[in-house]
Amino acid sequence: MGLETVIKDIMDAAQANVTMVNAEADAEVSQILDEARQSAKKIMGDRLAKAEDDIKRLRQQETSSANLEVKRATLNARKEVLDKVYDNSVESIVALPAEKQEELLKAIIEQNEGNGSKIYSNKDSEELVRKLSSLEYAGNVDCIGGVVIENNDGTIRLDYTYDIILKNVNEQSLKQTSDILFG
């Protein structure tokens, strides 16, 4: 064999080695790419699932927030209506005819006059209270009507002003009033 044949055999063996190395490299590249694709699919799936969970959570938060806002607006509207009813009650009491005012004051004074020695009223009712009561008239109080009766030394004060009576009635019947107005 000649030198050319030996060189050719070496070249053929080297070429076979290169082909084999290239085939192994191609197989390894293909495997790495497949693993990368699988990993990318998994990451994409995980991120998609997380995004869907985030969307659900945000939707629930927005719904809860909207429901809360609706409840707040409803409660504020109801409070405004109840305040308006209270204000209308005050206006109705202030607008009572003189005969009715006298009748109410007479009833309050007759029932409670024995509990004190001094009596107070608003400026508008002063003359009427002086006429209806045997107690010492002690002055004016800021109220829409009614009287305050006090003992001799001022340690006991009974407040029968319409303001206090209306406030107490309002507090006691607030739920019932709300049920009537709002069902």
Image: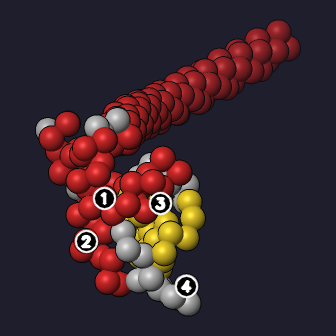
Disc 1 secondary structure class: helix
Q: Position of residue 134 (x, y in %)?
A: 38, 74
Q: Residue 84 vs residue 172: left or right?
A: right
At horizontal 29% and vertical 51% (from top left) the residue drawn is: 102
Q: Which residue is mark 4?
A: 154
Q: Which residue is mark 1?
A: 105
Q: Residue 102 vs residue 51: left or right?
A: left
Q: Position of residue 62 (x, y in %)?
A: 44, 31
Q: Are marks 3 and 1 in contact (CB under 8 Å)?
A: yes
Mark 1 neighbour density, 10 Å: few (under 14) some (14–19) many (20 or more):
many
Q: Depth-wise, is mark 4 or mark 2 nearer the camera?
A: 2
N-term-proximal mark, 4 vs 3:
3
Indicate the quadrant containing the C terminus: top left, top right, bottom left or bottom right. Answer: top left
Q: Position of residue 60 (x, y in %)?
A: 38, 36
N-term-proximal mark, 4 vs 2:
2
N-term-proximal mark, 1 vs 4:
1
Q: Which residue is mark 3?
A: 121
Q: Position of residue 127 (x, y in %)?
A: 45, 54
Disc 4 secondary structure class: loop
Amino acid found under the numbered disc labelled 4: Gly
Which image quadrant for residue 28? top right
N-term-proximal mark, 1 vs 2:
1
N-term-proximal mark, 3 vs 1:
1
- Residue 66 in view: yes
At horizontal 66% and vertical 20% (from top left) the residue drawn is: 22
- Residue 1 in view: no
In three-dimensional space, the C-alpha distance between marks 4 and 2, rounded to whole angstroms, equals 20 Å
Q: Residue 69 vs residue 3: left or right?
A: left
User: Which dot marks residue 110?
Assistant: 2
N-term-proximal mark, 3 vs 2:
2
Mark 3 neighbour density, 10 Å: few (under 14) some (14–19) many (20 or more):
many
Amino acid found under the numbered disc labelled 3: Ser
